[in-house]
Amino acid sequence: MKKFAIIIPALALALASFAPSAEAATLPEIKDRFDAVEVKLDRVMDRFSDVIEKAEALGKDTTEAEALYNDAEAKREIAKAEVAELKVMLDETEKMTPEIKAQAKVTKDSLKAFKDTMVEMHSKLKDLFSKKPVADDGEPADVGDPVE
């Protein structure tokens, strides 16, 4: 589960990168931050996909995790669309406007919804790997944790 310790903080960092006041940074800096956020969204989803595949290979029931993954993927697409819309707005102006601030809030909310789903999926996957499989004879099976 050590690799999960990297994923969640990376996502939190991506969200926190927009947390400071929008007026404190220049518009190009804000746009650069969102470029990094898009890359991190894709990396996190790829990592979770790999972990789900490993769980399936070990014969674990990944139904709930897959449902959360699909939900997260939909929320990621929404977040990416909101980020793209905000970036277009940033390209069209030289100063912060109320419309940009409103779009920034919508974008931040969509990123938070994505993060919440990812945290829930992380919890489900952590539970999957913390359960000890039982062999046919009733003894705990000797199966390693592919995540550590």
Image: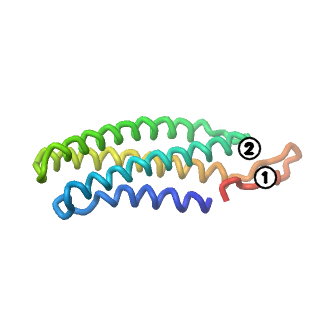
Return the residue at label 1. Answer: 143
Check disc 1 and give the amino acid type.
Val
Residue under the point 19% across and 59% down: 26
Return the residue at label 2. Answer: 58
Q: Is residue 122 above or below residue 81?
A: below
Residue 14, x across and y down, in percent: 38, 56
On the rendered structure, is 93 left or right of 63? left
Q: Residues within 10 Å of mark 1 (few under 14, many from 20)?
A: few
Per the model, the C-alpha gap separating discs 1 and 2 is 8 Å
Colour scheme in the image? rainbow
Residue 143, x across and y down, in percent: 78, 52
The disc, 1 or 2, on the residue closer to the chain's N-terminal end is 2
Frontmost residue, 39 versus 41: 39
Frontmost residue, 46 versus 75: 46
Label 1 with label 2: CB-CB less than 8 Å? yes
Secondary structure state at the residue bearing disc 1: loop
Residue 101, x across and y down, in percent: 16, 50
Check disc 2 and give the amino acid type.
Leu
On the rendered structure, is 64 left or right of 9? right
Secondary structure state at the residue bearing disc 2: loop
